[in-house]
Image (cartoon, grey):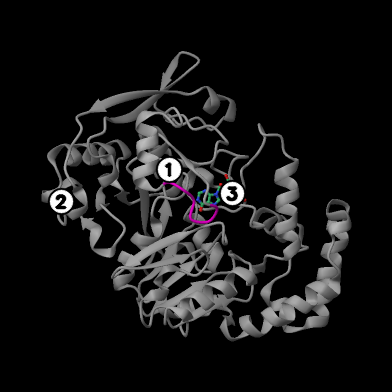
Amino acid sequence: MPLDIVVGAQYGDEGKGKITDTLAEDASAIVRFQGGNNAGHTLVVEGVTYKLHLIPSGIIRKGMWCLLGNGVVLDPRVFRKELEGLHAQNISTDYLRISWNAHLIMPYHVQLDHIEEEGRSSKDSIGTTRRGIGPCYSDKTARTGIRIQDLFDLDRFAKRVGTALDHHRPRLKEATPSVEEVVEEYRDHREMLLPYVEDISPRIWKLLSEDKLVIGEGAQGALLDLDHGMYPFVTSSNCLPATAALGCGVPPQAIRKIWAVCKAYPTRIDTVGPFPSAMPMGEGIEQVLIDRGGEFGTTTGRRRRAGWMDAVALRYAVQVAGITDLVITKIDVMGDLPLEITTQYSIDGEVTDQYPTRLDHLYKALPINEEHPSFSGDLTKARSWEELPKNARGYLERISSLAGVPLRMVGVGQSRDQIIPVGRNND
Ligand code: IMP
């Protein structure tokens, strides 16, 4: 029963979409199990760019089941746009299905996300994507959420919307929409969504029982996990692979491999939260990485911050995520730059190689870095491990050995053929 999971090992934006797409070659289905349109995937196939936020990246492969599990939160406005975009690019959505247990992002969730984020001081800001993700998951746990299946009966839907609006009125105040307005809008969404909805789990059970490969496509990254990330600077769902079983309704034993994707230099969105291996923002190498790497959010357009490869955080991710196979992307961006890896932190003068799960310690953590010789040349044309410069290989091997996980693929660019397989030689 092979369910292989692809997760981010850092703070999101590691290039998971491309890796999912590569692994999809042998798969029958791709399933998203958490998050919503706070994620963003860019795929370049045969010179054509596809930007996706919600729909799994397998959609551009003919006959590939693309599934959205119950753990996902779905904004119908965004879904509609994405569908239209795909259809305009002649991509079929016949194999797309959505769990009717997935929660709907409602217009008031987006309003609440704005109100909450704007109400936070700059120090406490979480820098959310303002897509309504947090308020939607809050409603889910408060049992005031609206599931797709509530659309089957519009009277019941209206009642549930009324209850949710009563709950949120004190914060929405005069911006509270009327039940009628919401129902009117969702009547249209209903027509668009219904052809795609079903109970997803039996479809996945069937594929797994036929020994077909299913890929779970994680969104965000290990350090943004609601429980094990740097709370409160995290997303509002669990994004570690253990969530995959719950988020698409399959037994945890189905999980076989856990592919972790990490970027050759980590980035973190915005200026919020601790980032121990951060480089000084806007200066020298950091700015070069941002410019060369195009480090602006696919979803929000915001500038990211860049840092040195952080092996302390990566080892922690390996532990909490159960990573079995490592992929490092964007090594091409680091040509002719100094290479450093954070191997330990100093916290109040104490040196540790353990990632601190106390936020106050994380804020105080100072990186202790080891230096590696830089490499030059255009790596984007390399198509095999041997074609990579020796110093680039040395850097990558060191990361893999510090993580304690074999390196399986290296990314040297945006397109499909720029993913280099790495043999089993460095197991
Ligand atoms: P939310 O997921 O919109 O609630 O945002 C919570 C935090 O997670 C913010 O710091 C976001 O910038 C971050 N975040 C959410 N999704 C992503 C992602 O796909 N990549 C990187 N950061 C993300």
Vertical relation: 125 (above or below) 340 = below
Some atom of ligand 1 lies within 8 Å of the CB belonging to the residue at label 1: no
What's the mark number on residue 385? 2
> Distance of mark 1 from mark 2, alpha carbons?
25 Å
Residue at 54% x, 26% y: name it.
Answer: 363
Give the crowd class for mark 2: few <14, some 14-19, many >=20 residues within 10 Å: some
Q: Nearer the viewer, mark 3 or mark 1?
A: 3
Judging from the image, what secondary structure is the residue with disc 2 in? helix
Give the crowd class for mark 1: few <14, some 14-19, many >=20 residues within 10 Å: many
> Distance of mark 2 from mark 3, alpha carbons?
35 Å
What's the mark number on residue 235? 3
Vertical relation: 215 (above or below) 16 = below
Some atom of ligand 1 lies within 8 Å of the CB belonging to the residue at label 3: yes
Q: Are marks 3 and 1 in contact (CB under 8 Å)?
A: no
Residue 424 x %, y %: 17, 53
Q: Indicate the quadrant where residue 374 lies.
A: top left
Circle 1 sits on which residue?
A: 317
Residue at 17% x, 54% y: name it.
Answer: 381
Q: Decide which of 47, 235 is in the foreground and name it.
A: 47
Residue at 83% x, 81% y: name it.
Answer: 155
Vertical relation: 9 (above or below) 311 = below
Q: Indicate the quadrant where residue 45 lies.
A: bottom left
Residue 23 x %, y %: 31, 65
Q: Earlier in the sequence, mark 3 or mark 1?
A: 3
The amino acid beneath tag 3 is: Thr
Judging from the image, what secondary structure is the residue with disc 3 in? loop
Q: Was residue 299 drawn as part of the magenta stretch in this picture? A: yes
